Amino acid sequence: MAILSSQEIFFTAFEPKVKNRFIMYIDGFPSYMIKSISGLGFDQGEIKLNHINIYRKIKGKMSWNDVTVTLFDPITPSGAQAVMEWTRLHHESVTGRDGYSDFYKKDVVIDILGPVGDIVSEWVLKGAFIKTADMGEYNWDTEAEAQNLTLTLGMDYCVLNF
């Protein structure tokens, strides 16, 4: 018969992270404008090696998944204008000029907050850039609903600092 350790018997303090306790920092966007961000994740794939009469598998190249960021679009400062200013660093529609990646790639920081507002976890999205943007829909049938902007961000990689 197994003997239980003291860690298994006695109470252990536990406070889960809560989905609505975060602050996100993107250069050029006020933090209060950021409504949500999809979960971070990655895919390593696999490589199949042919060995005699069986396959062996090893991990493939790691690729970070794209994230979806939803923004409020306030009247002032304009959320759509902030998105377009970042987009112009990628590509200028009027002249057709594309920008260098050094100009349009940004580091995005997500601070996860504890119950008293302390930072308990920090993610840094390195080399983030806009892949797609949806500027929202306008509809006469919709009443009292905030306008949202949706961005899909690609990135080089993520770092979990703590």
Image: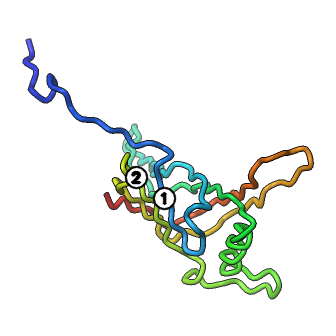
Q: Amino acid at mark 2?
A: Leu
**x and y percentages locating residue 33 in the rendered image:** 62, 61
Q: How is the image coloured?
A: rainbow
Residue closest to the eye, 44 or 27: 27
Q: Residues within 10 Å of mark 1 (few under 14, many from 20)?
A: some
Circle 2: element type:
strand
Q: Which residue is mark 2?
A: 113
- Indicate left or right for 161 with 60 as reference: left
Q: Residue 158, located in which quarter of the rendered image?
A: bottom left
Q: Which residue is mark 1?
A: 23
The total number of labels drawn is 2
Do residues under tags 1 and 2 come within 8 Å of each other at their CB atoms?
Answer: yes
Residue closest to the eye, 137 or 67: 137
Q: Is residue 53 above or below residue 113?
A: above
Q: Amino acid at mark 1?
A: Ile
**x and y percentages locating residue 15 in the rendered image:** 32, 38
Q: Is residue 65 above or below residue 19?
A: below
Query: Which residue is found at the position 24% from the left and 35% from the top?
Result: 13
Residue closest to the eye, 3 or 47: 3
Q: Which quarter shows the N terminus?
A: top left
Circle 1: element type:
strand
Q: Which quarter shows the C terminus?
A: bottom left
C-alpha span from label 1 to label 2 = 8 Å
Of callouts 1 and 2, which one flags the residue occurring earlier in the amino acid sequence?
Answer: 1
Q: Is residue 119 above or below residue 145?
A: below
Q: Which mark is residue 61?
A: none
Query: Which residue is found at the position 38% from the left and 49% from the top?
Result: 58
**x and y percentages locating residue 143 in the rendered image:** 84, 45
- Indicate left or right for 1 with 101 as reference: left
**x and y percentages locating residue 161 in the rendered image:** 33, 61
Query: Which residue is found at the position 13% from the left and 29% from the top?
Result: 7
Q: Residues within 10 Å of mark 2 (few under 14, many from 20)?
A: some
